[in-house]
Amino acid sequence: MAKKKISFKSNQKKKSKLHRKTGKAPGTVTYMGKREGVASKVTIINYNKSDYEVHKADSVEATIKLQKSDMLQWVDVVGISDERFVENLGTYYGLGALVLEDAVNTQQRPKIDEYENYIFGVFQMLYINDDNELVAEHVALALVKNGVLVFQELDDDVFAGVRDRIKNKAGRIRNKGSDYLFFALLDAIVDNYFVVLEHLNARIEVLEVEVYENPRQEVAHKIQELKKDVLKVRRWIFPVKELLSRLIDSESELINKDTKMFLRDALDHSIEINESLQIYREMSMSLMEMYMSNMSNKMNEVMKVLTIMASIFIPLTFIAGIYGMNFDNMPELHWEYGYLMVWGVMILLFLLMLIYFKRKHWL
């Protein structure tokens, strides 16, 4: 299955995506992702205090037939490039055209919108895949009276724990309403941000060691990629704090007082995540400064060695230059031990300079 790796897109690709939406009326459901032509699949989980059901559906009609008035319903739609399917399903649940437009727009910034009969939110679901790569997936959540709708692109997500709690009657989720399910899904997204932070922290620690021990050109490229990832992750995570605050302050009848207490816990986690991200941002920026400083120190060491070598050989070259002149009246040229004496002077001078540099701690 294809993974959505975090990477910058070319300007040409960005323009082509925006071109699909340009000129269309507001509220036109237009898919803005990269996985076109993927059929939508729906998993419906119906549950209450005593019963639990899981169903699969591949059409809006089949999804509607599985709705039960005496059970909460979690409708999980995987694959949002089928614009007509998403529009028809959303219309049945009373979602507005502008909301459905945002549900399939993978470039949409995180947001929360409150309406009379539902609450709609868009988030970036971040996780680390099996290849130890950072994956960013667009996910839209809609809280309705008796359930929650989830729109996402990939089968992989961070909701496995929520599914297990519903199936095994763990915790309080089976005894709560749809607002608690909405919170549980949000909480799973926020909690997985900690895993992403651990991934970024591990990359920073590895790069710190490489910067100190072997500051190569490849390390500079890794630092640049890390800085980009930290900034993009921060852009996706930073708004979540404000969105959770809005849910806590909401006067919507869809969210009861008890659920707001749990939302405050998610808000605390979000604040902690944002503070850590700010630290990682500063650390990633300081890594490049450390790299440049170490490269400069390394170059200074090289220049120091070359300067010392030059300082040693300049006087020796001077002596060799004098006795390399072709004058007739140079009495040392005719001495029997003149050659050995010159070598002795040069070796003695070499040793004296080494001793001097050593005492000055230049060597």
Image (spheres, grey):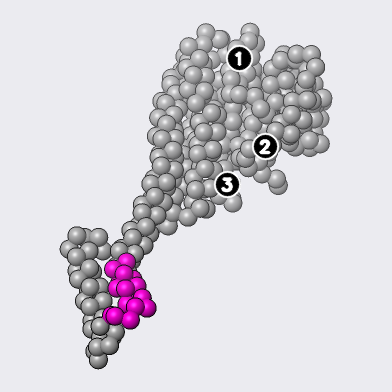
Query: Which amino acid type corresponds to the residue marked 3 in the rendered image?
Result: Glu
Q: Depth check: give the residue in front, 203 or 182.
A: 203
Residue lying farthest front? 329
Q: Residue 258 has which mark?
A: none
Judged by depth in the image, the label closer to the viewer, 3 or 2, is 2
Q: Residues under labels 3 and 2: Cα distance?
A: 17 Å
3 up-or-down from 326: above or below: above
Look at 52% across and 19% down and name the residue there.
243
Where, quadrant-wise, is the C terminus in this rendering? bottom left
Q: Is residue 252 magenta?
A: no
Residue at mark 1 = 113
Kind of residue indicated by mark 2: Lys
- Does 324 appear in magenta? yes
Identify which residue, 19 or 351, lies in the foreground: 351
Q: Residue, x 80% and y 17% (percent of image)? A: 23
Q: Would you name the residue on which mark 2 appears?
A: 9
Quarter where residue 311 is shown? bottom left
> In whole angstroms, how far apart are the C-alphas of marks 2 and 1?
28 Å
- The stretch of residues the image draws in magenta is 314-330
